[in-house]
Image (tube, rainbow, N blue to C red):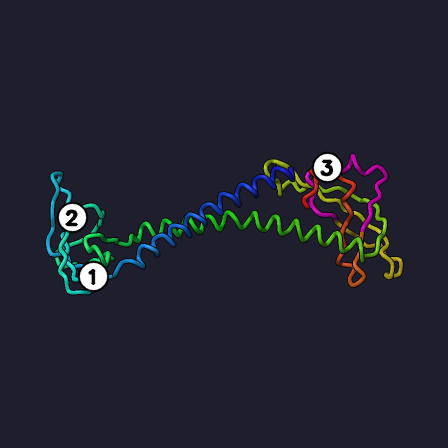
């Protein structure tokens, strides 16, 4: 189960980064084009019509060196226009007949794709970050914490938290942590992707407790196969 989740997270991350990369590449490409173009407002001076009665604007604009440029925007697919309207466009300083008209719809599409890519990356990043923190905490707790042997009291199946059809489990246990007047303390393990009962031969399990707070502890699950562990 752990391997399946890792593979899904890796796939999501790669796909998400592809979306983000394509969005950034397209944006930089457009910015590169615009850096060679000059922005201006063109006025719709007439309305043209194709053989199939499709209309298109005929516009005129003035360049920075006072040239008047008139051209039809038949290929630009401008949805709403009327005579006298102004259309924001960019023209090539060397060849004013070469123009670029920003598309709000296209920009919105690229923004959505980029956002979707980020949203796909986030779960993968959070998953691997959580795994990294868990491993770090376990290593630190084993090195610095106090070890006690606790007795397993129950194994809980988290039926409402199924992932990919697999039910996770947690181990509940209790033991005397010391410094509490002999009072028994209850502990619970992290997530396990299989019923761990077959691995608990004597119902005993190690717990490592921080010297700073008894609320900061880990239940040692290293006796379980790696595949069934969350971290």
Q: Where is residue 137 in the image (x, y as percent from the top left)?
A: 72, 54
Real-space Cα separation, disc 2 to disc 3, in angstroms: 68 Å
Q: Name the residue under label 3.
A: 195
Which comes sooner in the sequence, label 2 or label 3? Answer: 2
What residue is shown at x 74% (from left), y 48% (from top)? 189
SS type, badge 1:
strand
Q: Mark 1 points at which residue?
A: 41
Q: Which of 154 and 110 is in front in this view?
A: 110
Above or below, comparing residue 63 to residue 50 in the picture = below
Identify the mark nearer the N-term, 3 or 1.
1
Extreme-right residue of the structure: 182
Kindly identify which residue carries mark 2. 56
Q: Residue 217 carries which label?
A: none
Question: For the point 71% across and 50% down, which residue is it?
Answer: 135
Give the spatial CA distance, label 1 vs label 2. Answer: 17 Å
**Extent of the magenta region:** 189-207
List x then y, in percent, for residue 193.
68, 39
Of badges 1 and 2, nearer the viewer stands 1
Report the quarter where the N terminus lies. Answer: top right
């Amino acid at each position: 189960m752990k391997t399946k989740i890792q593979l899904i997270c890796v796939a999501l991350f790669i796909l998400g980064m592809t979306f983000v990369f394509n969005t950034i590449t397209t944006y930089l490409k457009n910015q590169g084009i615009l850096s060679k173009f000059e922005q201006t407002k063109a006025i719709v001076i007439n309305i043209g019509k194709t053989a199939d009665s499709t209309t298109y604007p005929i516009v005129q604009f003035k360049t920075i060196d006072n040239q008047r440029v008139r051209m039809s925007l038949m290929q630009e697919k401008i949805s709403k226009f009327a005579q006298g309207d102004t259309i924001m466009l960019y023209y090539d300083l060397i060849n004013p007949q070469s123009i670029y008209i920003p598309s709000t719809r296209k920009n919105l599409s690229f923004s959505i794709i980029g956002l979707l890519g980020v949203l796909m990356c986030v779960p993968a990043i959070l998953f691997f970050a959580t795994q990294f923190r868990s491993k770090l905490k376990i290593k630190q707790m084993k090195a610095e914490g106090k070890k006690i042997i606790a007795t397993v009291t129950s194994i809980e199946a988290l039926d409402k938290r199924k992932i990919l059809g697999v039910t996770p489990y947690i181990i509940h246990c209790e033991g005397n942590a010391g410094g509490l007047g002999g009072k028994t303390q209850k502990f619970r393990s992290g997530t396990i992707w299989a019923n761990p009962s077959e691995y608990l031969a004597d119902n005993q399990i190690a717990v490592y407790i921080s010297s700073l707070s008894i609320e900061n502890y880990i239940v040692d699950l290293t006796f379980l196969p790696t595949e069934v562990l969350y971290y």
